[in-house]
Image (cartoon, rainbow, N blue to C red):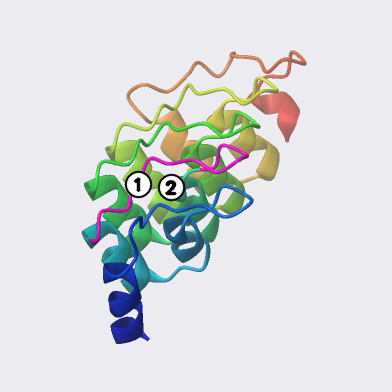
Amino acid sequence: NASSATYIIHHVTNVDTTDQYGLTALHYACMNGNIEMVKLLIDAGANVNLCDRKHNYPLHYASTKGSTEILNILLNSHANPNCINDQGLTPLHLCIIGNHIDCIRKLLDSNANVNARTHHGSLPIHLAAYLGNIDTFDLLNNHSKAPKLTETDEQGNVCIHLK
């Protein structure tokens, strides 16, 4: 419960302590969609820009979960919307994979890079095309910094080849 969590947080010397996977309490709170815990940890000084051993940041976990509220909290606390994990995935890529359209909009409003490529050379718009997410594809294609539809991934595919 919140009062127990508050007590523990205020009696821990380092709120950013990691486990064997490099995960902090904030990573777990984001992973589990625990909005109240995210707020408590950030208020206690948790670093929103710490990555785990796979270079996933709290924003990656919030994006995978599709939690717009946690995404807002992290971004308002200066989380980097363009952080990259060890697969070359940004939070935007993960929101597209999960088809979390409201999170995608929030990331785009927070200057997420629509031209960020994964380690396989895929742009966010390539993922939207491959997954058949038409609303997401249209949102990305209409963005002011949208890549050209002729941009290829590392296999030479353009968007039309992917679906």
Horizontal side, residue 3 vs residue 64: left or right: left
**Where, by quadrant of the figure, is residue 29 drawn?**
bottom left
| Observer-nearest of 1 and 13 | 13
Amino acid type at mark 2: Leu
Q: In this rendering, does residue 134 appear at all?
A: no
Decide whether residue 52 is among the magenta residues.
yes
Query: Viewed as shown, does residue 96 lie left or right of 12?
Result: right
In front of the other: 150 or 80? 80
Indicate the amino acid at tag 1. Answer: Val
State which quarter of the image contains the C terminus. top right
Q: Position of residue 151 (x, y in %)?
A: 59, 14
- Residue located at (50% from left, 46% from top): 60
Kind of element beneath mark 2? helix
Which residue is the extreme one toward the right?
A: 155
Residue 59 got which mark?
Answer: 2
Residue 108 in the figure: left or right of residue 100: left
- Dot 1, how many residues are within 10 Å of its Cα: few (below 14), some (14-19), or many (20+)? many
Q: Which residues are magenta?
A: 44-56
Whether residue 151 is visible, yes or no, is yes
For the residues marked 2 and 1, what is the alpha-carbon distance in whole angstroms?
Answer: 8 Å
Question: What x and y, as percent, mark residue 15?
Answer: 36, 57
- Which image quarter holds the N terminus? bottom left
Q: Which residue is mark 1?
A: 48
Classify mark 1: helix, strand or loop.
Answer: loop
Dots 2, 1 in contact, CB < 8 A: yes
Which residue is depicted at the point 22% across and 61% down? Answer: 43
Residue 123 horizontal/vertical position (percent): 57, 25
Residue pictured at 36% horizontal, 70% vertical? 37
Res. 39 image quadrant = bottom left
> Is residue 45 inside the magenta stretch?
yes
Residue at 65 percent across and 32 percent down: it is 87
Image spot of residue 35 (x, y percent)? 36, 69
